[in-house]
Image (cartoon, coloured by chain):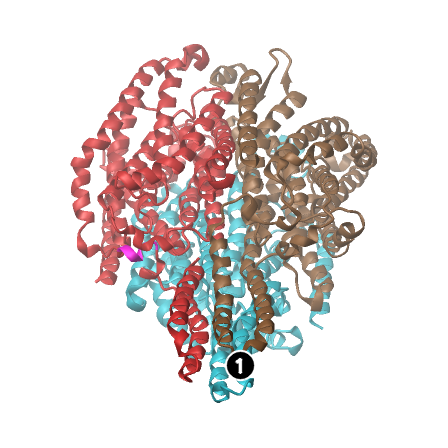
Chain colours: A red, B cyan, C brown
């Protein structure tokens, strides 16, 4: 059942995409063969003034973050690396097609011919939208089937487009998407994780950890995200000083959160040792928290302050909040997205509100009049958003929950969570287990033979139980 | 013999390169110190109008694809990761020097002073040319020596320059190189693999597979290629709408082939499990198939259709064709390049021909008159190309085959294929094998001692054979 | 003590940074909200003429090199991958903040309001400065504590700013930083390694090597550095032909050093096998050596010659010099930075001096008059620099040495060098060791039981010693 479902859902959705693209999607004037005529009409003198050349490098960086950054960050589990990077690939590739359509309908539907014109900015926005869904994936990593993921992505992208429409029409400013992307993605993921709560998840506890090399793979993902985050926060900004400033602010904020994460991690962990989980995640919080205010004249030192605060919040979240939420709130957050995305996202929204309120026209030059109004809307929206998360749980997300809990999606058993064997061909492991078994049982067989010689029968039971214990340990070892 | 050969060939070729560069290669006007004068003569007002700034980001992406994308994709074998990434490095670095010369002689020899002027576009073209040879390397991965690879690259680059000259003079359009790069590279590699057919390759079957982490490494390579493919297809395109459109088309086509690959892979594989080999390779087919038509106004939904078709073809190729070719056609295709490059490349050529035929001047604006003619040439060329592959086998490639089969190149024995130990210092493995031996033999030695005490001699033979079996299993395990 | 020290030092320094940034650091006019006014004043017609768009792609490449290139290159040790990539992350994030301040004070302090205006070029320069400190880290990898590293970075960045001020004011030309970055970083690191000499380092010999997959991780780092080096050498160059030429020269030089490294490596190593250490490091020497002369009209073939020379020097350094220095000069150079950075850096300085001397005005166009003077200064400076390294050892660096040798920094014991367990939570290893122990001791326990049955007591001692040997071997194996 599982096979044909994945197969047919992928095919049906892809064909639906083709049909909808055929009806709705056209090229942007800048990407259209009529560009030369358009140039003449708009007094553009050179092909090089095509916006493409000023967006494409940023787009590439964002694209790398989505597919390589998130993908590799999700490989940290010792036996779910294929699933982490593979399903990330699947839902991103699906999500971006759907995002192009949804965002097009909401933001840029051409009223003359009812089509969507896609260009460089649409592709970046589609990647942003996918980022929100990947954050949600992080909370459910290892506990859901690919089909559930695709349903989640379909709903997530739709919800995202609506939410983005509301927020951006109210406040106009959220360049790096602290709220639109990160807070949304975070709380969406946590809600789904809450809906799909598994009381017996401890049965697959042996697989819920990292191995030495899977931690290094995840670290590559972290670095991809960290290095390219300035592009993320500046990609769709206004040309000129805005983008320039967004890069500087994000760069500084990220640098500050690295230091703070190391500090708090060494303070909180056992015997002062650093934890890879913190370094892989909390170091990125500075980028999230700088999202909304990235283009604002916050001045360099404030960017550092934002980085410090977000680093502290995020690391403490991993130490205190994640275990608390799992124990008392029935939210099992595999990647700790609450600490990396949701909380720093809220902080980012607050920073945006405060800075916009304090920004006077003298700092912003002649163009900054609307800022005070915006800041009030910011605050309002923050409250609205925090409230919304609760109210939506009873509405849209409840029905989503019902859909996701349908038994036919083929989600893994409690004892098979975080295990690639369920969905992927993993030949190596079988050999491992076989070899392990042989390695433990050979001495026992020998002893058995000896025992049968009637000299040493008394100690047989003891030896057997000991050997079984060894076998379990070795299995554990080879998985790691 | 092997050592001094590698050594002297590398040195001699590098010195030959230096000599040829001294005679032929000069800087492009845009990279020359006389640029300021050139600017005055050509009414260029700002340094920033140097084409460098509009090509360099694309060049970097292509460069990353060649060295990191291909290199890491070739690490998928459990014990040939060094060879995959290392020899990829060697032949790319050699190939690009030779490509600069060959492409210069064929395409841009300055008839006034018989020199080649190299600039940003030459570097991108050299990387493209190297890509063709790396594709060919993929078919022979693990079965050839570094010297054979260098001979292959020398011949491949030369052949590529000739072929490119012929094709681009006939049809003018092959931006992303579906035919010029991928189909050429694919069939060149398959021919060499056919020449170097090893009937006893099954002797190294134990090493012809992936381990868990080597699959993740290869997946990083895949993602590098996937993410940067839009740059590959647009890098040497015309500035303006053409490059813009090439990016959008490639982006969509790639996204569609990911979904299709997951669908077909889960359908075809055992018990509905996904196969990493498919995900690593077939997801890229959309980029290959979009190569020729990348700049054409195919409209977004057609790009999705191309992606779907290429994803299906490529995945079915892995399931059906590769085993068939190995069994019945004496072609051992290690990386499945026939499925990833050759077939989608042919599809891409066909797409180019069809779309060019249907493109009318109304879509293309005032500049699209020549399209119908081009499309006919396209079709002609496709047929010519398919025919050529057969005829060349008996000509140039036969002599190449003779050269490559010379016994002095130091190619690995049949039982040592896919093994890094032949060409690389791999200390870790020795320790592994030693430890494995100790681990199995210690109990046996103990038992031996016991046996000698004459109490338990009868069971000795049985124990010994059992222990030997365990040893083999453990060896197998530690390699994986 | 260790925990709270790391913690408080990170916090105190971060707070100091915030205070200093609040006092001194402001946005560049191009990143300031007054940019529109600035545009009117300077007759800039379009936002797109903001220098941001011509520096940012290069900045991103350099940023990737610092955090991903260096970070992954340092993961090559089998059990110090976390430390390599993690501490690289920590000191880079700290160093770049301090570098922004130090370089600002020395190079771009605005005398009207005593502030530093930071823009894209400052960020690139900060990354360059950090590169110097990371090179120094390479020499001490695995032998120092994070606090020592932070002290090293603080002093290194300060020293770097002074040195850069002196050199760039004397000779004006060192685009790719052969001398300023690489030679400085190299000799700074070697001096610290000499100060912190450990006579009993052989006690952790078992950990001073690579495992199969850690070598592949390091190779990814190498490729990141190799691919992006052209950006490194051109990032802060003058717009126009200079940057264009810097890219071409670096690209060719790097390609040539790859071939030479393979040649020399296969010649020098045991039984003609290639060594991953050489391929990971010496292939990059071409980029270092091209640093100073990158923008000069050296002509393409000279770039190849530089690459060949640096590849030979560097590989021979690994084969001959590093063991010699460790044995006779009390310098333990973990990553071989003397071969990759210090020596090719000196070569680069010499190349710069020679080429500048031979450059005539006819080659350089109207703007090249000052070259002869510069070349003389070059040579002078090279000698000065080589002398300085010795004299400074007795001054600044002696006091640095005293500081670094303070017992309270928590540096690892001689037998725990190159071991992540000292500073990181590594759960997997504990399981490994436990399992290993069980695996060896189980047969022994069984035998013990048998022995106690008084039949086989004689052979007990022999068995026990053998088992202990097996245990040690297995431990060794599981670490690798």
Residue A435 is left or right of residue C404, and the answer is left
On the image, numbered disc 1 is attached to which residue?
B450
The residue marked by circle 1 belongs to what chain?
B
Residue B297 is left or right of residue C321, and the answer is left
**C219 lies above or below C187:** below
Q: Quadrant of residue A28?
A: top left
Residue that sits furthest to the front in the current view: C454
- Residue found 55% across the figure and 43% down from its top: C423
Residue A149 is left or right of residue A464, and the answer is left
In the image, A302 versus C381, the foreground residue is A302
Quick one: quadrant of the C terminus of chain C?
A: bottom right
The percent coordinates of residue A104 (x first, y second) are 27, 37
Residue interval drawn in magenta: A414-418
The percent coordinates of residue B386 (x first, y second) are 44, 69
Q: Verify whether residue C377 appears in magenta.
A: no
Residue C266 is left or right of residue A475, and the answer is right
Asked whether residue B173 appears in the rendered view, the answer is no
The percent coordinates of residue C18 (x first, y second) are 53, 22
In the image, C44 versus B60, the foreground residue is B60
């Amino acid at each position: 059942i599982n096979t044909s479902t994945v197969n047919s859902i992928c095919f049906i959705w892809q064909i639906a995409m083709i049909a909808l693209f055929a009806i709705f999607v056209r090229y942007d004037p800048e990407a259209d063969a009529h560009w030369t005529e358009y140039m003449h009409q708009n007094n553009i003198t050179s092909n090089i003034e095509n916006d493409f050349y000023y967006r494409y490098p940023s787009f590439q960086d964002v694209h790398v973050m989505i597919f390589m950054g998130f993908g590799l960050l999700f490989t940290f589990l010792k036996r779910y690396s294929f699933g982490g990077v593979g399903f990330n690939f699947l839902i991103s590739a699906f999500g971006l097609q759907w995002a192009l359509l949804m965002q097009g309908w909401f933001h840029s539907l051409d009223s003359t011919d009812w089509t969507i014109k896609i260009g460089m900015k649409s592709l970046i926005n589609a990647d942003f939208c996918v980022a929100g869904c990947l954050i949600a994936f992080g909370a459910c990593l290892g506990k859901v089937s690919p089909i559930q993921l695709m349903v989640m992505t379909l709903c997530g992208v739709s919800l995202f487009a609506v939410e983005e429409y509301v927020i951006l029409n109210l406040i106009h400013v959220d360049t790096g998407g602290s709220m639109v992307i990160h807070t949304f993605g975070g709380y969406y993921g946590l809600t789904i994780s809450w809906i799909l709560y598994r009381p017996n998840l401890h049965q697959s506890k042996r697989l819920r950890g990292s191995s030495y090399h899977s931690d290094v793979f995840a670290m590559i993902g972290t670095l991809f995200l960290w290095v390219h985050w300035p592009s993320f926060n500046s990609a769709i900004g206004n040309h000129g000083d805005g983008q320039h400033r967004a890069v500087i602010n994000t760069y500084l904020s990220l640098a500050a959160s690295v230091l703070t994460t190391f500090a708090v991690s060494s303070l909180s962990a056992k015997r002062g040792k650093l934890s890879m989980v913190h370094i892989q995640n909390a170091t990125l919080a500075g980028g999230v928290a700088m999202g909304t205010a990235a283009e604002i004249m916050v001045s360099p030192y404030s960017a550092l302050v934002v980085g410090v605060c977000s680093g502290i919040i995020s690391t403490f979240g991993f130490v205190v909040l994640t275990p608390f939420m799992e124990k008392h709130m029935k939210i099992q957050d595999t990647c700790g997205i609450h600490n990396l995305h949701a909380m720093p996202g809220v902080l980012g929204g607050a920073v945006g509100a405060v800075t916009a309120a304090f920004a006077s026209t003298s700092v912003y030059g002649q163009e900054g009049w609307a800022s005070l109004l915006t800041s009030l809307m910011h605050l309002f929206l923050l409250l609205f958003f925090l409230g919304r998360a609760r109210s939506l749980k009873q509405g849209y997300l409840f029905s989503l929950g019902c859909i996701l809990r349908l038994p036919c999606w083929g989600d893994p058993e409690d004892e098979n969570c975080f295990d690639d064997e369920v969905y992927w061909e993993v030949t190596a492991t079988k050999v491992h287990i076989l070899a392990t078994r042989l390695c433990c049982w050979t001495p026992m067989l020998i002893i058995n033979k000896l025992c049968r010689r009637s000299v040493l029968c008394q100690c047989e039971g003891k030896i057997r139980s000991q050997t079984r214990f060894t076998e379990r340990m070795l299995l554990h070892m080879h998985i790691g």
